[in-house]
Structure formats: structure tokens, C-alpha cells
Amino acid sequence: MAIYGATLLNLALGLAVLTQIVLFIHIRWRDERLFHVGQRMALGVSMLVTLAAATLTVLLVKSAFEVDYVAHFTSKETPLLYKFAALWAGQAGSLLFWLLVLSIYSAVVIFQNQRKRSDLMPYVIAVLTGVQLFFLFMVNFSTNPFIPVNADFIPSDGLGLNPLLQNFAMALHPPTLYLGYVGFTVPFAFAIAALVVRRVDAAWVRGIRRWTLFAWLWQSIGIILGGWWAYNELGWGGYWAWDPVENASFMPWLTGTAFVHSIIIQEKKEMLKTWNMILIISTFVLCIFGTYITRSGAVSSVHAFTADKFGQLFLAFVLVIIAISAYLVISRRQVLKSTKRMESMLSRESGFLFNNVIFVSLCFAVLWGTLFPLISLKLMGREISVSIPFYNQIAIPIGLLLLTLAGVGPLLAWRRTSKESLIRNFSIPLVIGLGAIAVFFVMGIKSIYPLMTLGLSFFVLGTISMEFYRGIRSRTKRFKENLFTALVAMTSRNRSRYGGYIVHLGIVFMFIGFVGKAFDSEVEATMSRGDHTELAGFKFTLQEVEEKVRPNHNALVAELNVEKDNKIVDTLNPEFRIYFPRTNREQQHSELDLQTGIMADIYSVFSGADHTRGLYAIKIMINPLVWWVWLGGYFLVAGTIIAIWPRKKKE
Amino acid sequence: MNKKFAIVIGAIAMVIVIWTLTGFSEYELPYVTVKELKEDNVLQPGKRVKMGGTIVDGSRQEIAEGWRFDLAQDEMSINVLYSQQTVPDMFHNKRVEVIVEGNYKNGEFHADNLMTKCASRYEGELEEDI
């Protein structure tokens, strides 16, 4: 059956090449019929890719261990859900998955625009199949997921999915991130098309606004799920460590966020045309680069960066994109010139512009840190990486600047803002922010960053609440609506504005959560049954350790009583598991347990055991305010969905 | 206005860029090899460095401060003292590759940070059933 999959990929590659040729001839000789042929061929490529991905899925579910990929990432015991998830667990499969997502998007774009934007569509389709062509080349010639096992026997069982990855969030994290990474291909394709036909006004931007937000939404969800997984599975008590894989997903998010904001200026004011082009091109390049970093294993060391064929092909692809894009932007600089000018430093436009320059600079800092091992290797002959504090010292102040802008920007008027409106809009939030700083200072928070973050968070909360309050009040007065209907009506009349505020609210909650990091505490103890240890006013007693035999692993389950003021408030059950017991692949795994709270999480890890002597290593952490990070995530998602939600067609 | 604007924006970008380029000398973590540590004396004592290698199976030893193990790199190996009791799950795997951060003192590597190679690249070797 694997042969069918491989053949489908061959056919898709061939058809993609033909599509390019047909579209090229159409563009050259303007024969409408050829455009329709090209369109259908592009749909054909997408269909073949979908069938190939379906074939691999069937092979995974059927445990066809004669296929190398199947034998590497699943085993007989792998639960069904994770057999599906194995589709994106390894390099070859995830490239095919990338291709699948792009194929679906590309088909949607073709159907959406059957009778629209006929000037752009030939180029849009050419770019989309061009990107497909690259990935088809990769899965056909570099990392083919249908390759048989490299042995003269069929393994009776596969290796199985790493237990760390057998987690619901981890099963969902890669596909969500890919929905984002791949999603930015669509606005990129429209950007290139607009450049080619020299129609770079507000129209193309309006056309891709929802696609961009859609990609941005999935990118955000992917990043948050990744953090959630790290926090709930890895057991070091954090959700972000600035490692290259995380940075790889964060960088396109940063430029993408800048783009989401700056296209508003182009829509409303026809400014920043060149800048928007550069942003979406960079975002797409960073998405490809991110896919490479994540999938190449050039993770803990960038040594392997250009060493292998896989890396060289990716690098070549990135260079081709940059070269073509640069040529287009430079040769179209006349039409990209904006006719309007900035009028004041204190205007909505300038707020967006500051936001943009700060997002992009932060992206540069992260890129520099991520690539520094490579740069230093080339320049100084030694690989030097940078540690987490480097990122923090830059990202914290920049993050605070962005938080400030999130509060100030939306209240500035277009063109220029008067003194009166500044006073009217900002005096109450300012008082709230300063009040919050005073209260938290008295409560004992003395360090500068946490205080500033909390103060700014309350300031932004103030500005957002005032916006909602004003909007609602004007409706209740004018239409005599009650509070709730006014809120709903107002939000649905101006979805991008109020959706945006809700996203900002989410970001504020996340920042409140980040503050908690400054107040983490932990204790490590080797305990026997009945021993206890204390942390942050809680008493932890190891009540019992039970041995359990489960289908694919053996576990020691601890019963850890949590007491406060001599009252049991909770019981935690961290586990110490052995996967593949009594084989030479025996693997230990700590399944942590935590109690989530609005103020703090109680987090426990069962990190080691000497069961015969009855000694157990337990690590306990108190992580304040982490809950707010996830709460912020929900707001971000809800707000973006509101902003994307289509309007009803006017009757 | 546009010119003034460009200057302000440019200045902000410059500040962040310069800050990025100059701000990390204290956070640098050079990669070193075992050979460099043991024979070449390339580093000033106490300098924080990073080192990668494979844990020698059978050398893992749990001690009061944390863990002790041998890290092999090509033909050479070095004794590592890791100052935490909690280790990543993959630490115990056979022939596991790890990266440690810390400094080199008296023939021993004192590590306070240990990472295993990324879990998403988890690949073992297939075996025939007997």
C-alpha cells in the first residue's frame, strides 16, 4: 500500500510542474481557457496530496510496520489517537502534513475566488502551487514518508511514540501551529500577485485580512498549546524557555502581529504599502525557516544548519523567495510609494507605526539570539549560544512598551489627537494604574518589573473598560437597550474593533500571569512514606506510594496530601512511570500532577524512586498566577474569532 | 513630519538593535569540547560554558547533591557533577545525548543545567523479534 502513497506523491509533483507551465502560458498569451485548466490542475494537485496523506494515515492506523515511518513512530500499543497524531510526529510525516494543510487552503482559496479577483488569481495560484512544488520535491526526494524499513525483515512491532508526546495538547500542538505557519502562505501569495500586477492599493489588503487573522489565530493557539504542554508535561514548572523551537514559532508570530496591525493603516489611509509587503514576506520566510528549525533537529545545536541536504534545500528555497520578493518590491517601488503623510506623533497611525517597529525589533533580537551560535561559528570559529537571561533582559522592557501601546494606541484619534481628548481618555486609566502600583507596593511587591507590569496591566484594563463602558452607555441612552443587548449589538456592529479589544484584554491577562514567574518557589525532597516537607505555608505529606501495572507502562503513584493550617486542602497524585518495562528500551517518565488556582498552582513532580528501599524523590513548586496566562489565551482566541466572524450580507 | 517621524522610528529601532548586539556578552555560553577542557586550557577558570555528549551507560550515580555521570565525546570522556536531583525523563535512556551548562573545576564539570536532545527527534533502532 505504501507504493500507492509514493506514487500519489510522484503524480502530485508532476501535476504541480504542469500547473506552473499552464499558468505561465496563460499569463503570457492571456488565454482564459488555460486559466481554467490551470485552476483545475491546481485542485488536482491538492486532491493527490490529500489522498497521499490519507494513505499514510491508514498505514499508521493499520500498523504497517514494513513502512519505516510507521515503525519509527507507532507501535502495537500506541493508542489510536496517537496513531493519528504520529502523522506529524516525525520529519517526513510532518512535511506531508504541511503539504496537506497548504493543499486544503489552496483549494479553499480557489473556490472562494472563482468569480473574484480574476486579475490576481493566476499569480496567486502560481505562488501556492510553487510552494507546494517545493514541499512535494522534499517529500519525494529528501524525506519520503513511504520508504520501507531499511532491513531485510518486517519488524513485528514498532518503536512507539515517545511517552512525552503522548499527551492531548502535544497531539494538537503541531497541527495548530502548522495551520498558522501554512496559513501565512495565502496572504503572501496575494502580496506577490498584487506586486506582479502592480495593484498594491487597499483592495488586496482587504481581501486577505480574514485569512491573515485566521493564520495568526492558529499560530497563537499553537504557541499557547506548546507552552501549556511544556508546563503540564515536562515538569520544570515553566511554559517558555526561549529555546530555538519556541523562538522559531514566536518570530513569525511577532512579524505577523505587526502585519495584522499595520494593514489597518493601509486599509484606512493607503499608507505603509512597502512596509506591509516587507512584513508579510518576512513572516512567510520566517514560517518556512521555523518549519525547518523545528523539523530538522538542528535544535539544540545549529551545527547541522547547512550540513545536510535537507537544510541546504530549505536554505535554497528561502533564498529564492527572498530574491524574487526583493526584486518585485524594488521594481515596483514607484507604485508602492504612499501619497499621504503622517501628520502627528500622537495619532492612531503613529501608534501603529511604533507598535510595528517595536514588534520587528523584538523579532530581530530573538532571531539574533537564535542564530548567534551559527553566526559566531562562522565569524569566530566557535559556537556560542546565548542563555535565557539575554532574551529576558530585552523582551521584558520591550514587552512592557508593547503593553503600554496596547492601552494607548486604540484611544488615539486618526491624524492627530488633541490635548483635551488625551486628558479625557487617559486620566481615569492612569489613576487606576498608579493606584494599582500603590496597592501592590503596600502588599509587599517591591521589585520594579513586576510592579510596572501590574501597573500597566491595570492601566490598559482601565482604557479597555472605558471603551466598552462608553460604547454601551451611548447605546443604552440612544436605543434604550439593556446592558447585555447593548454589549452584543455594539460588538457585532464593529467586530474588528471590539474583537481587537478582547484580544488586548487577553494579552493583559497573560502579562499578569508572567508577573507570577518572579515569585516562583520550589523544594526538592527525598521522602519515605509518612514524611513531610513544607513550602510557602503548605505542608506536604507523602501518604502512600502505590504500584500499578498498566497496558503500556508500569507506574508508581504517589498520594501527596497538601495541608494548610492543619486542614487537608488537596491531594496530588504525581506518577513515576516506566515505559517499555524490562526491555532494553526501558524509559522513565514522570507524570506530574498539579492543582490549578487563580492565585497560584501547586505543582508536584515524582522525579525518582528507589522502591525496594522505599525512598522517593519529590519536587514541589508553587507557581503563582500561571492560570492567568491560560485565561488570557481564551480571551485571545475569543477576540480573534469575533474579529474574523463574517458579517451577514446586507439585504 | 514624515522626516521627523522616520528619525524617531529609526532611533527606536537603532536603540533596540544596538542593545541586542551589545547586550549579551555576559550571557554568552560558548560550546566547548572535552578535549579543549582537559588538554588545551582555552578558558579562564570559572567561565560558564556549554558542552554536549553521550552519557556513558552504567556511569549514572545518584548522590546527595544530585547526579554524577561520565559524558563521552569521541574517544574522550569527562566526569560531570549535576547539582539537581530532578532530571529530565530521557536522562535515563540508553546512549542518551545531553547538553550540560556550567563550569569546569579541577578535572570535573560542574553542571547546573542539563538538557536532553529534543523529544520530537526521538528515534531508536528497530529490532527483529526473536
Image (spheres, coloured by chain):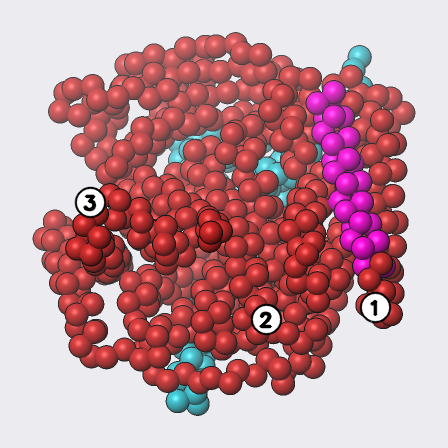
Chain colours: A red, B cyan
A397 left or right of A363 in image: left
Magenta-colored stretch includes residue A38 = yes
A232 left or right of A372 in image: left
Q: Work out whether residue A586 or residue A162 is closer to the camera in this orientation and state it.
A: A162
Predominant SS of the magenta segment: helix
At which x and y percent is residue A233?
A: 47, 32
> Which chain does tag 3 point to?
A
CA distance separating discs 2 and 3: 44 Å
Which residue matches tag 3?
A482
Does the image show residue A610? yes
Tag 3, which secondary structure? loop
At which x and y percent is residue B118?
A: 59, 41
Q: Residue at x 67, y 73 (%)?
A: A195
| Quadrant in the picture for residue A152 | top right
Tag 1, which secondary structure? loop
Which residue matches tag 1?
A30
Q: Is residue A289 above or below residue A581?
A: below
Q: For the residues labelled 1 and 3, say whether their Cβ atoms are less than 8 Å apart.
A: no
